[in-house]
């Protein structure tokens, strides 16, 4: 995804664009070996839809024609918390419910229409071509067909690393005597177990109106729970169930997966699964947050940039990855438009601008993981204050203006700094006061609130209430 988006941008400014892909792209909508995370839940955020439509006109309509669904998470996803089913609210911010394979198939087909673009499939990049001198410069890459044959060189004025989480750029830089950029890693020691299901509409109860069900993590200091779950509709009758566990063992096979579902706080997920047909094995994946700080690189390489997961890898819990890659490509487009492809300052300016944007999703993803004691990573004062503020903000989200702004930040429409604007701060401050008062009362009453959470009515546990009607016309 990151490489195709970058290739689309470069095609406007360079005479020839070559995208080298390790896999042989499938001819149909299907997962591929080079994208193991594709087997886990993906959601294209509001900002991602906007950016991909800007990069690839017709993207949105083509996705819909292939079965993708627009939905409003705040209104059409039910969330079961310790105190019961959470409320719903309208934001007007729509996500795409579609598999990673579908979204990529649309981007890939639109990319193939570009006149300057060349796709070298089933080909592995084996190294960077780096020229010495007063400043190092990347002049191309070495590659080798995976089907057999000798190594060859692709010369280039600009090389873009969009190879994802498995990037070998740090290794190749060291081999060339160049120290790679420093890294920040926040590791929650966990991951995902996922499975695809087919949901025949004929067997679907009429009162099961939701497009997704979530059991979120809880950040209570007294009773933290880092296990979460999301079960969401994708294209057609396809559904995807993902269990996220951190600090403990993942379900490794079908028996452990089903046993986990039978012991959730709500029986609804298990009931849904009984009416569905599993159509895949249980897939596992590791989750980690990692940033390579190219913006601080002391030994930069001219003619080289990097984007996507090769720079910023995020815990997929907030479903930000595809959107972050699309925004990075748009940043590259803006800078190329300002200074042109021959501007020697392009890599430095790009890395700086990309880092400013990526700090927002990284703070959201890594900050949430750092709430748990088993997570490895630096707990800076900034992160501690941010998490305290987010606690108060979640209480203030009963106010329409605050919850809209929070939704805009989580969908990467607005930066995290917009949560510090005066109207939001005022409402959040009052929520913080109420939060402190509630904790004090809870201590006096002997933790009465903990007892309250155990008295959720059985009907509330098994069936979430239906929100206001949703107009299909609003989705076009």
Image: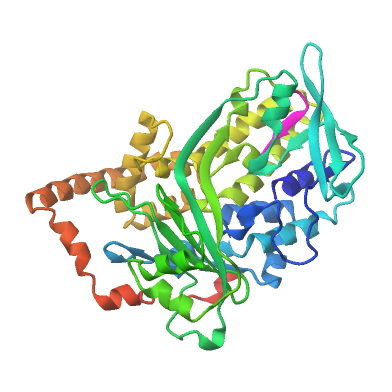
Where is residue 426 drawn, in percent x and y? 30, 43
Q: Residue at x 42, y 43 (%)?
A: 369
10 or 378: nearer the viewer: 378
Whether residue 73 is situated above or below residue 177 in the rendered picture? below
86 displayed left or right of 56: left
209 displayed left or right of 30: left
Whether residue 112 is situated above or below residue 310 in the rendered picture? below
133 or 167: nearer the viewer: 167
Quadrant, the C terminus: bottom right
Please report the bounds of the magenta region as a residue range.
301-308
Residue sitting farthest toward the bottom? 202
Q: Residue at x 52, y 36 (%)?
A: 359
278 displayed left or right of 145: left
Q: Residue at x 66, y 48 (%)?
A: 326
Residue 237 falls in image quadrant: bottom right
Whether residue 36 is situated above or below residue 238 in the rendered picture? above
């Amino acid at each position: 995804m990151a490489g195709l988006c970058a290739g689309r941008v470069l095609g406007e400014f360079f005479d020839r664009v070559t995208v080298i892909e390790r896999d042989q792209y499938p001819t149909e909508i299907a997962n591929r070996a080079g994208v193991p995370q594709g087997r886990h839940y993906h959601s294209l955020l509001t900002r991602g839809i906007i950016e991909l439509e800007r990069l690839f006109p017709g993207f949105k309509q083509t996705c819909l024609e292939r079965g993708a669904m627009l939905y409003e998470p705040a209104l059409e996803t039910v969330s079961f918390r310790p105190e019961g089913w959470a409320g719903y609210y309208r934001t007007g911010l729509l996500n795409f419910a579609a598999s990673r394979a579908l979204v990529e198939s649309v981007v890939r087909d639109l990319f193939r229409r570009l006149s300057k673009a060349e796709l070298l499939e089933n080909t592995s990049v084996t190294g960077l071509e780096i020229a010495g001198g007063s400043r190092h410069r990347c002049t191309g890459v070495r590659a080798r067909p995976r089907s057999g044959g000798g190594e060859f060189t692709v010369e280039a004025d600009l090389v873009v690393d969009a190879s994802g989480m498995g990037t070998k750029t740090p290794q190749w830089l060291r081999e060339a005597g160049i120290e790679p950029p420093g890294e920040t890693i926040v590791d929650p020691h966990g991951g995902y177990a996922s499975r695809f299901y087919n949901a025949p509409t004929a067997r679907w109860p009429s009162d099961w109106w939701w497009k997704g069900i979530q059991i979120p993590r809880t950040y209570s200091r007294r009773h933290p729970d880092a296990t979460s779950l999301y079960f969401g509709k994708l294209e057609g009758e396809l559904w995807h169930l993902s269990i996220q566990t951190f600090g403990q063992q993942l379900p490794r096979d079908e028996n452990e997966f089903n046993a986990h579902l039978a012991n959730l706080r709500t029986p609804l997920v298990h009931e849904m699964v009984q009416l569905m047909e599993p159509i895949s094995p249980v897939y596992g994946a590791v989750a980690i947050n990692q940033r390579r700080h190219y913006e601080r690189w002391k030994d930069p390489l001219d003619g080289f940039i990097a984007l996507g997961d090769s720079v910023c890898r995020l815990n997929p819990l907030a479903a930000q990855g595809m959107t972050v890659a699309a925004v990075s490509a748009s940043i590259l487009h803006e800078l190329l438009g300002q200074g042109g492809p021959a501007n020697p300052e392009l890599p430095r300016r790009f890395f700086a601008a990309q880092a400013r944007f990526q700090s927002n999703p990284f703070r959201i993803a890594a900050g949430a993981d750092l709430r748990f004691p088993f997570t490895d990573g630096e707990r800076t004062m900034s992160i501690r204050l941010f998490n305290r503020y987010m606690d108060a903000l979640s209480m203030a989200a009963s106010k329409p203006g605050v919850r809209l702004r929070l939704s805009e930040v989580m969908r990467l429409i607005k930066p995290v700094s917009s949560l510090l604007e005066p109207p939001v701060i005022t409402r959040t401050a009052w929520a913080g006061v109420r939060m402190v008062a509630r904790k004090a009362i809870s201590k006096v009453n002997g933790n009465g609130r903990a007892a309250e959470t155990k008295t959720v009515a059985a009907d509330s546990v098994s069936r979430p209430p239906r929100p206001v009607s949703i107009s299909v016309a609003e989705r076009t």
